[in-house]
Image (tube, rainbow, N blue to C red):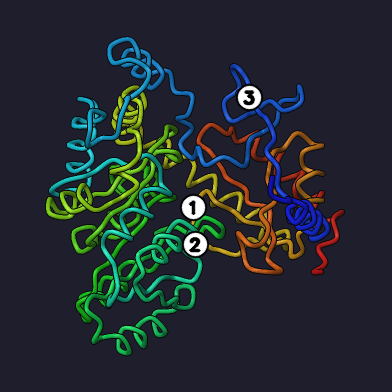
Amino acid sequence: MMDQQWMAEQLEQLKHQSQFRKITTTQAANGAAGHLMRDGHSLLNMSANDYLGLSQHPDIAAAMIESLQADGVGAGASRLITGSSAPYARLEAALAGWHGCEAALVFGNGYMCNLGTIAALAGRGDVVLSDRLNHASIVDGIQLSRAEHVRYRHLDLEHLESLLVKHRDARRIWIVTDAIFSMDGDAAPLTELVELKQRYGAGLIVDEAHSGGIYGPRGQGLAAELGVSSAIDVHIGTFGKSFGVYGAYVAGSAALCKWLVNKARPLIYSTALPPSVVAGTLCSLHIVQRERWRAERVRAAARKFRHSLDEAGINTSGRTDCPIIPVIVGSSDSALRFSKQLEQHRILASAIRPPTVPDHTARIRFSLSASHSELELDEALRVIKRTAMETEFADE
């Protein structure tokens, strides 16, 4: 067997740098929405992306159970072989109508969706201009595509335009951005990005992973909220966050979706999602559109939560009503210490450390949910403020 001592040595180095990660086991807290059980204790779950509180919705569970009984537990093959069951067709038609697009295509998860879509659309001779803080799945998709990968400074439209001018002779130019950035909760300037892409003849890919369900008149995302959906070439979204289920999708032209069926390797070579998951997602899509009070509630809670922390002098970075609220700590060690102290007060809020975020910007990323009560959030704020005062946020 190959010598694996190098792994042990580098793992020790990660521990020394406070960047070692491990998997911990949690379970749902029966009857307590917005909570998880760990080591026998109920914790207020402020780490999950279940923004609308749908992950335990009884109607979604019922739809999945019905599909399990009718369609079985697994797809059995990739979508191009025998795995694309009837629930897929219903979900994709509903997604296309929801976005006002010609077609939609469901993938196994958000990482696979970005990886497969970007690698299928860009290649040698193309340039992809990517916001520096885009999600890792976007970065990896660009690298896999073999296109020239050029990052523009975060939200810096002037820098982006200079790059569009510089690379205007490329075969194709794509601009790709998250709509809401997962670690800061700030929003991409989609209206301005649309103007730039039209001016320079570029394509625009927008990942609505953290904005879908929350923004837009029917939860379609930030592009719909801003009225620019029809100008975006490729809409990407996920079902594991606001939808409370699992999977991802692309929405756009019929030609786009046909191209991806033929060229997106994660779609072609992966076993399809279980039909029950697809059926549950279709149910969730209806709830997202019907129960808009969920989005209104979590956005109002986010405004209040962020304002309260800002008033206490705690750095929350962004200024949106997105339910992602980071508290920038600085060092990885301080972030881990802060997270552990919060857990002692029955709050689950994970430390986010490099390389997920830039060096010296380790943070606690609080995620609010419509399932959190006002009383729970008020108590959480009290604990967070007190813990922040007790914790030394010193850069290493």
Q: Position of residue 232 (x, y in %)?
A: 23, 62
Tell me the kind of residue under disc 2: Asp
Q: Is residue 24 left or right of residue 234?
A: right
Q: Depth check: 41 or 294 in front?
A: 41
Helix, strand or loop for disc 3: strand
Q: CA distance from mark 3 to mark 2?
A: 30 Å
- Residue bearing mark 3: 27
Disc 1 and disc 3 in contact, CB within 8 angstroms: no
Q: CA distance from mark 1 to mark 2?
A: 7 Å
Which picture quadrant has residue 218?
A: top left
Residue farthest along the front direction in this orientation = 1
- Residue bearing mark 2: 186
Disc 1 and disc 2 in contact, CB within 8 angstroms: yes
- Residue bearing mark 1: 322
Q: Quadrant of the N terminus?
A: top right
Which mark is in front, 1 or 3?
3
